[in-house]
Image: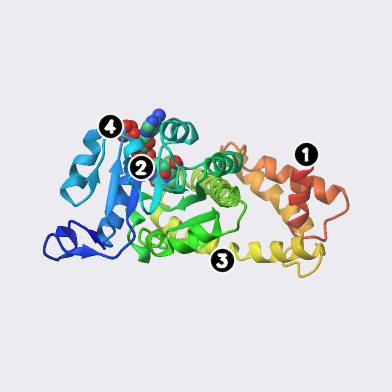
Amino acid sequence: MVRVHSSLIGMDTHTTSSRTPVTLLGLGDMGTALARAWLLAGHPLTVWNRSPQKAGPLAGEGARVVATPAEAVASATGPVVLCLLDDASVEEVLRATDVNGKDVVNLTTSTPAEARRRARWAEERGARFLDGGIMAVPSMIGRPETGGYILYSGDRALFESHREALEAPAGVKFVGEDPGHAALHDIALLSAMTGMFAGITHAFALVRPEKGLDPAGFATLLTEWLGAMSGMTHEMAAQLASGAYTQGVTSSLAMMAAGNEALLATAENQSVDPRLLTPFMELMRRRVAQGHGNEGLAGTVDLLRSE
Ligand code: NDP
């Protein structure tokens, strides 16, 4: 049982908590949101931040503030969570710490290679390691109704033993024991989002000059359309899994490639630069030219990978 300041959880001060103590290094926008979620859930929280003034408000809300990462890690009895800018800052912050026997959970956005290197680094020093990718913005943390979640991969036993604490800020999805897989999923999802925003940008550029066309009304159409079309990912996944790229095809590549001509002609008429669309259209054209017009989009995945 651990003493916890409890002004935020509606109890008298100096009550005790049976919740897992959490140690958090990094109090930027995301780290601060995580900190508040753990405090609100009643987890005893120790925090450190390079710029100490950011810890002030959290001290008033019940966090224990320490002066150095070494002190934070040494006193940790639960997960040591890092939420820093990038892998270089994680390297710098952990350098002077002794992680032997500790459970390190890195929520700093990393590449898969960085996450695997960090896992090896932790293992060599006697620590268990879990990497996480946060699929949420700070305002979604501690608010499960927003649908935000954190992807985890690495040490399954660590994940299971601290599951309750890890679930306090957001939903959790464990995606495997390869420590690079949370980062790979994170980056793949962000990459898909980037392509989606490219399409949205092009669409707004097409309709923007039209008098009497309300962007808000168009946004509603766009949201509904993208939602309906996103179901195609399951068709692609089934074809990629089976290798039967012509099975269950809803829209043939030949039809889509032919339709692209109307998209390009309209872009030209509306004086819109088509640069956000043309690389993908070129892939589709090439796949059709190779004799695969009766497939859906699955074949373009292989074409892209063999580049
Ligand atoms: P911020 O820029 O708000 O905070 C960065 C944090 O890293 C601060 O605590 C900063 O300390 C610390 N830091 C940076 N460099 C160093 C260093 N060399 N040594 C020690 N500490 C350092 O970023 P966020 O909090 O928003 O993001 C943190 C992580 O969360 C990132 O990896 C980000 O990709 C990820 N994330 C963020 C999301 C968001 O919407 N904000 C969404 C999903 C993931 P100091 O205060 O002293 O500058």
Left or right: 168 with respect to 207?
A: left
Q: Amino acid at mark 1?
A: Glu
Q: Earlier in the sequence, mark 4 or mark 2?
A: 4
Which of labels 3 and 1 is toward the front? Answer: 1
Left or right: 182 with respect to 150?
A: right
> Any mark on residue 54, and which?
none
Image point 72% across, 67% down: which residue?
250
**Mark 4 CB within 8 Å of ligand 1:** yes
Residues tagged 3 and 4 counted as in contact (Cβ below 8 A): no
- On the image, numbered disc 2 is attached to which residue? 74
Which of labels 2 and 1 is toward the front? Answer: 2
- On the image, numbered disc 1 is attached to which residue? 307
| Mark 1–mark 4 distance (CA, rounded to whole Å) | 45 Å
Q: Amino acid at mark 4?
A: Ser
**Mark 3 CB within 8 Å of ligand 1:** no
- On the image, numbered disc 4 is attached to which residue? 51
* Quarter-of-image position of residue 120: top right
> Any mark on residue 228, and which?
3
Which of labels 3 and 4 is toward the front? Answer: 4
Q: Is residue 85 visible?
A: yes
* Quarter-of-image position of residue 149: bottom left
| Mark 2–mark 1 distance (CA, rounded to whole Å) | 48 Å
Residue placed most toward the observer, 12 or 246 = 12
Ligand 1 shown in quarter: top left
Q: Earlier in the sequence, mark 2 or mark 1?
A: 2
Please state the horizontal and vertical placement of residue 163, each as a whole percent of the image: 43, 63
The local secondary structure at tag 4 comes to loop
Q: Earlier in the sequence, mark 2 or mark 3?
A: 2
Image point 33% across, 42% down: which residue?
72
Mark 3 burial class by Cα count in 10 Å: few <14, some 14-19, many 20+:
few
